[in-house]
Amino acid sequence: MIPARFAPALFGFIVSGLMSCIVTCIATIRNVGLGPETFGKWMGAWTLSWPVAFAVILVVAPLARRLVARLVRPEEA
C-alpha cells in the first residue's frame, strides 16, 4: 500500500491518466477516423498528453478545491 500522504498525487495521476486517455481517444477518432492507424496515433497522443495533464492537475487541483470551498456552504448538523 502507498502511504496516505501520497493520496493527492496518486489521485492526480489516476484522474489525469483516465481523462487524457478519453480525450485523446475522442480527438484522434475525430481527426483521423477509425482505421488501422487510429490506435497508434491515439497512443502517441496519449503518451504526450498524460504527463502534461498530470502536471496541470497537480497545480490546478488545489486551486479548484479552494474555489469549490468558496462556492458551497457547509452542511448543517
Image: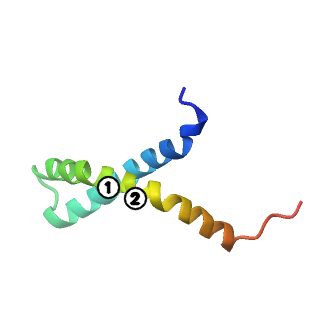
Q: Nearer the viewer, residue 40 or 11?
A: 11
Residue position for label 2: 56
Image position of 70 (left or right of 19): right
Image position of 29 (left or right of 71): left
Instruction: Locate residue 75, reporting x and y percent.
Output: 81, 64
Image position of 2 (left or right of 19): right
> Which residue corresponds to the image point at 45% horizontal and 50% vertical from the top-left?
15
Indicate the quadrant containing the C terminus: top left, top right, bottom left or bottom right. bottom right
Instruction: Tell me which amino acid carries mark 1.
Output: Val
- Graded by Cα atoms within 10 Å as few (under 14), some (14 to 19) or many (20 or more), the crowding at tag 2 reads few
Mark 2 near mark 1, Cβ–Cβ under 8 Å?
yes
Residue position for label 1: 52
> Which residue corresponds to the image point at 27% horizontal and 56% vertical from the top-left?
25
Quarter of the figure with residue 20? bottom left
* Numbered label attached to residue 21: none
Instruction: Locate residue 43, reporting x and y percent.
Output: 21, 47
> Which residue corresponds to the image point at 40% horizontal and 59% vertical from the top-left?
56
Q: Secondary structure at mark 1?
A: helix
